[in-house]
Image (cartoon, rainbow, N blue to C red):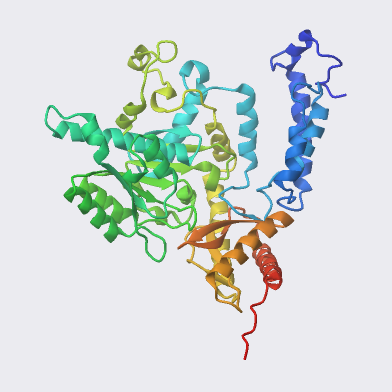
């Protein structure tokens, strides 16, 4: 039996599960056993997925009696192998090419182990002390990399969607404040809110529309700006929409530019967007959840203009190779964070702010928050920003090579030449140009590949048609891996086509 084994359910034994100075040896034993198992699992993983179906896996999990504890860590880990580890999707495998999930660097995993054991909550100084200052230092470091200036500030969040939500909240409240200041004395907030508009690329993240809905504006408050052939927001169209807003008595509260769209990795024209925002008095937000890896890359110039943003979203758990969650929202002017500042007597009374006690809850839409910043801190302190940038540059380089491979392969058509590390393409049946058949072929090929477990690719729609998508975030993925996956897709597509009924010959 393992060190965390008990022969009976004894209330006195329950305390041995608590981590403290008397049980640290048990913690060491249990964690060592789990790390030993997972490291062996990762070392022996031959495919990114087993291909198991929902119907096959669900009964095993439903059959676990959660009211009958095993009282043994080793037994629980044995069970976990059956209900999770065996069939998990492993992002570290070089043929996982689907979503914006990255393999993680070991220094960040060290941070994860530390922060979960100490369990600091980053809402107030009296719960986190050094954790508060470390997070603030990393926000300052990121703001400096962006170039936001000395008044910049920000906060770590759970992910890009939350970061975008907070940015839109700040933009909304700033727009309302200005509109009411310029309006007649009897103007009310209810007069302003229906006039607010968010302008963003037609290829931007869905969280912008979700944010508008959550903020009480409705998804219809978001204006989708057309994109060019490279899937970048057209600034001429943006200028037209901004002018139309003013003609119609609407308030362009924010323009959201994307630095790395989810599907295409496209980067909107940031300097030109900044010029238009300045001209029309709109808050400029840059969603760099994906493209933030460029901050430490030799391609940093692709982000030129981001320094003029009023707010920026970064997802370290995408292109900084951090475990989920690790994200942040940054603002040019820390004073705008007052829109999320609330004081509770039991937690962060106003007198603490007057005494300049650094409570992070004062600028977050969350209260309890994990010390996720520690993962990035240890990554920078152990391997350095330059090494992270090298890893990101490597996947971008590999994607450029993969584009050439696809471009020259008559079996496929590719939508755009990549700026970052995504490729949107599809298999083209040579014998039949029917677009609906091509849709069915590509849907089948993706599903069949996933069911085989040999590789995992994503899917999306372009102009209403089904396409496949590679997202490369693993430097271990080789061009040979990509070529093999393309062959597998073609095999599944070919098998599907041979099973289709042939059209009847016309009578003569």
- Residue 144 visible from this viewpoint: no
Q: Position of residue 147 (x, y in %)?
A: 36, 44
Q: Position of residue 322 (x, y in %)?
A: 57, 41
Above or below, 419 relative to 356 = below
Q: Quadrant of residue 40?
A: top right
Question: From this viewpoint, which residue is outermost toward the front?
Answer: 507
Q: Position of residue 415 (x, y in %)?
A: 49, 67
The residue positioned 69% from the left and 59% from the top of the image is 448
Question: From this viewpoint, which residue is outermost toward the top?
Answer: 12
Above or below, 377 relative to 48 = above
Q: Which quadrant does the N terminus fall into?
A: top right
Above or below, 251 relative to 268 = above
Q: Position of residue 30 (x, y in %)?
A: 77, 26
Please indicate whether residue 437 sits to the left or right of residue 200 in the image.
Answer: right
Please indicate whether residue 15 sits to the left or right of residue 356 in the image.
Answer: right
Of the pair 317 and 296, the residue shown nearer to us: 317
Q: Quadrant of residue 399?
A: bottom right
Q: Which quadrant does the C terminus fall into?
A: bottom right
Of the pair 282 and 198, the residue shown nearer to us: 198
Badge count: 0
- Residue 118 visible from this viewpoint: yes
Question: From this viewpoint, which residue is outermost toward the left?
Answer: 184
The residue positioned 20% from the left and 49% from the top of the image is 279
The residue positioned 26% from the left and 35% from the top of the image is 193
């Amino acid at each position: 039996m393992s060190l965390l084994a008990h022969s009976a359910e004894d209330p006195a034994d329950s305390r041995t599960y608590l981590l403290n100075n008397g049980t640290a040896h048990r913690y060491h034993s249990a964690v060592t056993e789990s790390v030993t198992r997972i490291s062996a699992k990762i070392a022996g993983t031959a495919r990114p997925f087993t291909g198991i179906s929902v119907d096959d896996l669900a009964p095993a999990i439903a059959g676990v009696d959660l009211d009958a504890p095993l009282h043994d860590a080793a037994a629980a880990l044995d069970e976990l192998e059956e209900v999770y580890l065996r069939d998990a999707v492993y992002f570290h495998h070089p043929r996982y090419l689907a979503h914006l999930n990255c393999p993680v660097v070991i220094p960040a995993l060290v941070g994860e182990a530390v922060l979960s054991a100490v369990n600091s909550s980053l809402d107030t100084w009296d719960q986190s002390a050094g954790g508060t200052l470390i997070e603030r230092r990393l926000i300052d470091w990121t703001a400096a990399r962006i170039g936001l200036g000395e008044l910049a500030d920000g906060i770590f969040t759970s992910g890009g969607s939350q970061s975008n939500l907070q940015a839109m909240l700040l933009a909304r409240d700033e727009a309302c404040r200005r509109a009411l200041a310029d309006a007649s004395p009897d103007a009310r907030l209810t007069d302003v809110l229906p006039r607010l508009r968010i302008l963003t690329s037609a290829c931007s993240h869905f969280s912008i529309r979700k944010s508008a809905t959550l903020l009480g504006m409705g998804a219809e408050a978001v204006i989708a700006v057309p994109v060019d052939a490279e899937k970048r927001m057209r600034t001429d169209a943006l200028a037209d929409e901004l002018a139309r807003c003013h003609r119609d008595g609407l308030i362009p509260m924010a323009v959201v530019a994307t630095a790395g769209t989810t599907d295409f990795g496209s980067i909107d024209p940031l300097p030109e967007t900044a010029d238009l925002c300045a001209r029309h008095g709109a808050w400029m937000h840059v969603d760099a959840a994906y493209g933030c890896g460029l901050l430490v890359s030799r391609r940093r110039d692709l982000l030129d203009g981001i320094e003029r943003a009023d707010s920026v979203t970064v997802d370290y758990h995408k292109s900084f190779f951090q475990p989920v969650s690790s994200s942040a929202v940054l603002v040019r002017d820390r004073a705008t964070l007052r829109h999320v500042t609330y004081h509770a007597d039991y937690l962060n009374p106003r007198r603490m702010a007057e005494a300049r006690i650094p409570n992070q809850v004062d600028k977050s839409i969350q209260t309890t928050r994990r010390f996720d910043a520690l993962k990035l801190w240890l990554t920078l302190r152990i391997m350095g920003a330059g090494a992270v940038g090298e890893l990101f540059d490597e996947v971008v380089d590999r994607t450029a090579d993969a584009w050439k491979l696809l471009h020259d392969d008559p079996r496929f058509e590719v939508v755009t030449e990549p700026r970052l590390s995504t490729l949107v393409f599809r298999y083209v049946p040579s014998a039949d140009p029917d677009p609906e058949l091509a849709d069915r072929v590509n849907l089948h090929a993706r599903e069949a590949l996933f069911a085989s477990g040999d590789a995992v690719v994503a899917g999306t729609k372009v102009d209403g048609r089904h396409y496949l998508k590679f997202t490369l975030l693993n430097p271990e993925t080789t061009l040979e891996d990509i070529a093999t996956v393309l062959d597998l897709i073609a095999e599944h597509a070919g098998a599907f086509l041979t099973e289709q009924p042939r059209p009847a010959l016309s009578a003569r």
